[in-house]
Image (cartoon, helix red, strand yellow):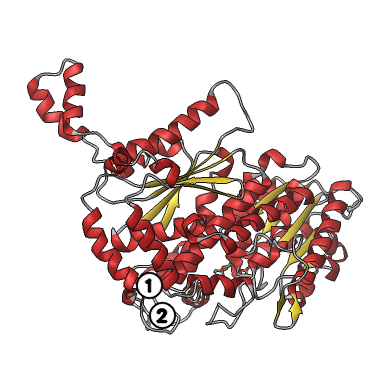
Amino acid sequence: MGSPTKLTAWKKLADHQQEINSVDMKSLFETDSKRAEKYTTHAAGWTLDYAKNRANEKTFSLLTDLAKEAGLETAIKGMFTGAHINNTEDRSVLHIALRASQAQESLIVDGINVLDEVRSTLKQMEKFVEQLHSGEWKGYSGKNITDVVSIGIGGSYLGPKVVAEALTPYAQEQVKVHFVANIDGSDITGKLKQMNPETTLFVVASKTFGTLETLSNANAARDWFLANGGSQETVSKHFAAVSSNVKKAVEFGMAEENIFPMWDWVGGRYSLWSAIGLPIAIAVGMDNFYALLDGAHQMDEHFRTAPFEKNLPVIMGTLGVWYINFHNAQTHALIPYDHYLRAMPAHIQQLDMESNGKANLLNGDGVETDTAPIIWGGAGTNGQHAYHQLLHQGTRLVPVDFIAPLASHNPIGDHHAQLFANCLSQSQALMVGKTLEQAQQELRDTGATAEQIDAIAPHKVIKGNRPSNTLLTDKMTPATVGALIALYEHRTFVQGTIWGINSFDQWGVELGKVLGTDIFNRLVSDSDNSGLDASTQALIEAFKKAQS
Ligand code: F6P
């Protein structure tokens, strides 16, 4: 596919933007008493209220046309049948298979039933988790494992960490799970200080087993283990791996039965559903891990079969395109009103920005449109006392997704009602804003003088008309968390398809890795740096001076 700007629906949306630009969302509610009902839809335990958007019937109909014209129906079919939609790496994209194995018998891709491989890995995980939880798995001195440290980065870290944290109320007592990612020595050092080598097991999670940060941290963990009572012969009792590079994991010291497979049809940022999710399964147990997969599968089925007009990932994806490409929105905020989901924006940031932060169309031509927005956010209500000021009065348009459960896992006092009230009031305030007259009256009511009113009132004006979606679920459970993350995965795919880019490669991160190795070699040697730019030369010198 070429540039979406050539599509009829795109051109119509550009014209339509002119019409709707001056329309206030409040008036859309005033003129349509059924608006909230019309623009609320449900799937896989989630309700999406998307009524607070700068969009009317015509907008939604054009956005649906755009998705169709961009070939989304064919793209979805391609994903679910294992077509090589990751064209630059000539690979299928099958994270959907990882959560289909309980519901579906087969999915034949390139002559192989991938669901058989998925099921056999899940069995391997079941056995491993059971051994850890029952205490059958012993450390080198015969003690039970009490702590698992997962070492990985990017998709081999963010997804598992965010989901394990989101499912804190489901955590099993027997084994605590920890995560280490950063090459910064402070990360692993801090973690090792809390660990006992006799009762700690490390899971090295790396699809390639070639990622610098992960290997450095794994080596540091093994050195620590060997220096604190462990031995080369007992490394296999304390180290397991998730990787498609079995040879390298065996060389490290893992026993082959404790190496969990990964496949080239799973991208790192889509891999928490595979054995990369082992830390989640250890944290919350295999039954909950299966429930997580099932929740995601429910969302997959919804995405695959629901008409676009009622399809959550399609609605959210196309609305995103509407703001990015037709309203010049540069960023998109995710604000979960759930403490356990507080790190979710970081996972969705990798998911979306690594997937759609691209400037080339599938055919190699340069894009003519903006692509992925900057994804950011954090937990409500904390953000209200930090960056929400910019959401309400800043110069930039920031579409927001509010995410909240109707019931809390910790219902104390009126905390949850207060939390929920804040969530609703934020989306309301973004839409309704405050007029100059209202600001003036407010000041008058406090007894302000005419002079004070003139001086202060303009600062209190909030333009409003700022869009948001609200996603609600009864409770954050393994199934609803699974469905929520799958929803964002598919939303990313919808947008990538409309932009005509490949959401499943990540060539952009390679250059930094290569240059990083080169500079590392220069930092630890007496190399001639005169060929480098003067800034990099000076910074290298500063580092070397500090070490001497
Ligand atoms: O550098 C980016 C990346 O390739 C991500 O896509 C991936 O999730 C991460 O590195 C980790 O890769 P691996 O699992 O191979 O260690």
**Residue for badge 1:** 536
What residue is rendered at 55% in x and 56% in y?
A: 487
- The circle on residue 200 is none
Determine whether 255 is above or below 112 in the image.
above
Marks 1 and 2, Cα distance to the nearest angstrom? 9 Å
Q: Does label 1 or label 2 sit earlier along the sequence?
A: 2
Q: Nearer the viewer, mark 1 or mark 2?
A: 1
Q: Which sits in the foreground, 365 or 195?
A: 365
Within 10 Å of the Cα at label 2, are there few (<14), some (14-19), or many (20+) other Cα atoms?
some
Q: Residue at x 78, y 75 (%)?
A: 251
Q: Residue 65: horizontal and vertical position, in percent?
A: 40, 66
Residue type at numbered disc 1: Thr
Looking at the rendered structure, the kind of residue marked 2 is Asn
The residue at which mark 2 appears reads as 529
Q: Quadrant of residue 439?
A: top left
Residue under the point 69% across and 58% down: 277
Q: Is residue 372 visible?
A: no
User: In the picture provided, is 294 more to the left or to the right than 6?
Assistant: right
The quadrant in which the N terminus is found is bottom left
Say if mark 1 contacts mark 2, CB within 8 Å: yes
Q: Secondary structure at mark 1?
A: helix
Label 1: how many Cα within 10 Å (few below 14, some 14–19, many 20+) = few
Q: Tell whether 22 sits left or right of 548.
A: left
Query: Which quarter holds ligand 1?
Result: bottom right
Q: Position of residue 98 (x, y in %)?
A: 70, 64
Locate residue 226, reporting x and y percent: 79, 60
Instruction: From the viewer's perspective, tell me whether residue 141 is left or right of residue 178.
Output: right
Query: Of residues 436 and 373, which is closer to you in this image?
Result: 436
**Regarding mark 2 in the picture, which secondary structure is present there?**
loop
